[in-house]
Image (cartoon, helix red, strand yellow):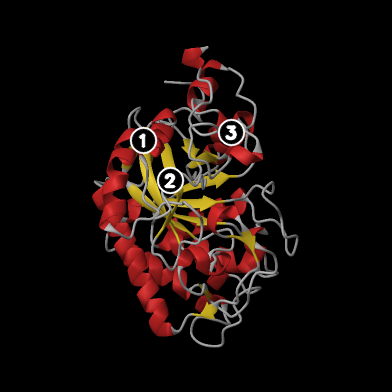
Amino acid sequence: MSSSLLLQATKVGKGADALEIQNRVFMAPMTRGRATREHVPKPIMGKYYEQRSSAGVLISEGVGISQQGLGWFKAPGIWTDEQTEAWKPVVEAGKTKGAKMFAQLWHMGRQGHSDVMKETPVSSAEKPMSSPIPANDHERKDPETPHALTPEEIAAVVKDYGNAARNAKKAGFDGIELHGANGYLIDQFNQSVINDRTDEYGGSIENRLRFLREVLDEVLTVFPKERISVRLSPNGAFGEAGSEDNVETFTEAIKHLASKQIGIVHLMDGLGFGFHEKCEPFTAQMAREIIRDVQKDDIVTLLLCNVGYTKDTAEELIKTSLDEEAPVDVAVAFGRPYISTPDLVERFEKGKELNPDAPHAAWWGTDSEEGYTDFPLLSEA
C-alpha cells in the first residue's frame, strides 16, 4: 500500500452498490469539443480517456442531456441511441487501467446559443448573459434572452435528465454526475443573482433548490445513490454566477445531498477559477462539517474537492480530513494538469515532473490529435 493517502484505494458509498476505486485522484470534467457536429462521440475520445485511465474516477466532459440543453459546439450528447452507442467503446477504453467512469450530465441553460441548441435558450428567469457566448465553429455571438421555463416545462427537463441517466447506464458508465455548478441550468435555479422567480421554483432557498431536488430524485430512479455525484460551485463567478447568500444556499444544498446519502459531493472550493467575492469563501471544511452533522456516525458521502490543487496540497487536505473525529473521506479532482499530463497518477507515484501546461488554444475544438492525445508519457521518455 502506498504511503500517499492520495494514491491509496478507497470506496465511494457503502453496501452492495459501493464503488471500489483504486486511488483518490479523480479527473475533473473538462469540455474538449471533439465530438461530431451532431454531438456524437468519436473514437479519438476513447484514446483520450484510455490514456488517463489510471485515475480513481474519470468524470467525463459535460454531456448534453438534450438538444435544448447543449449549446457547445462539438460537445458530446447522450440523448439519442446513436450517441449512446458511440459512448460504449469510449467508456470501455476509459476503464482500461482500472478507473471508474462517471458521465457528467449537463444542461447549459442561458449559456448556450440557438445556433447550436436549435431553439431559444431556456433558464430559470428571463435574464440574458451580459457578454458574448460561443456558438458554432467557436464564433462568439451576442447572448440571447432566455425563455423562463414554466413548471410544466421544468417537469419535461427533469425527465430529460432521467433519459440521459438511463442512456449513461446503457453506455456502461459506473455512475453519473449532475452538473450543478458554473452558472449552468441547475445553478441558474440555485443562485439568487439569477433566479428572480416568484413561483414555487424561486424566492426562498428551499424553492430555488427545488429543481436540483427534483432532478436528483429522477436520476435516483436509475442509479443507486452511491453512484451519483453532484457538482457545486458556491465560490464561482463563471457564467455570471455568485450570490450574496451563497453560503446559506449551498449549506442547505449539501445538507440535502447528505440526507440522500449520495456517493459524492463535488465541491469546487478552490478560488483559481474565479471568485465572486460577494460572501465569504465556501471551504472544504464547511462542507465536511455539514456532511458530518447530517450523517452523524454513519458517514457515507465522499467529498471531492477541486480547483488549483497540487499533489502536496491534496495530500494535506485528505490527511486533515481523515485525522478529524468522525472523518469524512476526501478525494481531489485535477483538471488542467490532466490535459497535458495523461499519466498524472504515474508521475505522482514516481515523483516525476508534470508536462508543461497546454496552451489555451489546445483546450477544445480541433479535429486532430494535436493538443488532445499527443502529450508525452513517461513510458515514452
Quadrant occupied by the N terminus = top left
Q: Quadrant of residue 55?
A: top left
Along the line of sight, which residue is nearer the eye, 276 or 68?
Answer: 68
Mark toward the start of the polypeptide (1 vs 2): 2
Three-letter code, disc 3: Pro
Tell me the kind of residue under disc 1: Gly
Q: Residues within 10 Å of mark 1 (few under 14, many from 20)?
A: many
267 displayed left or right of 229: right
Q: CA distance from mark 2 to mark 3?
A: 15 Å
| Coordinates of residue 330 in the picture (x, y in percent) | 50, 42
Residue farthest along the top direction in this orientation: 381
Inspect this view and state whether residue 75 appears: yes
| SS under mark 2 | strand
Name the spot of residue 255 as percent of width and height, x first: 49, 63
Indicate the position of residue 159 as horizontal and vertical percent values.
33, 70
Q: Is residue 108 visible?
A: no
- The residue wearing badge 2 is 60
> Pointer 1: what residue?
94
Residue at point 51%, 69% (across, down): 114
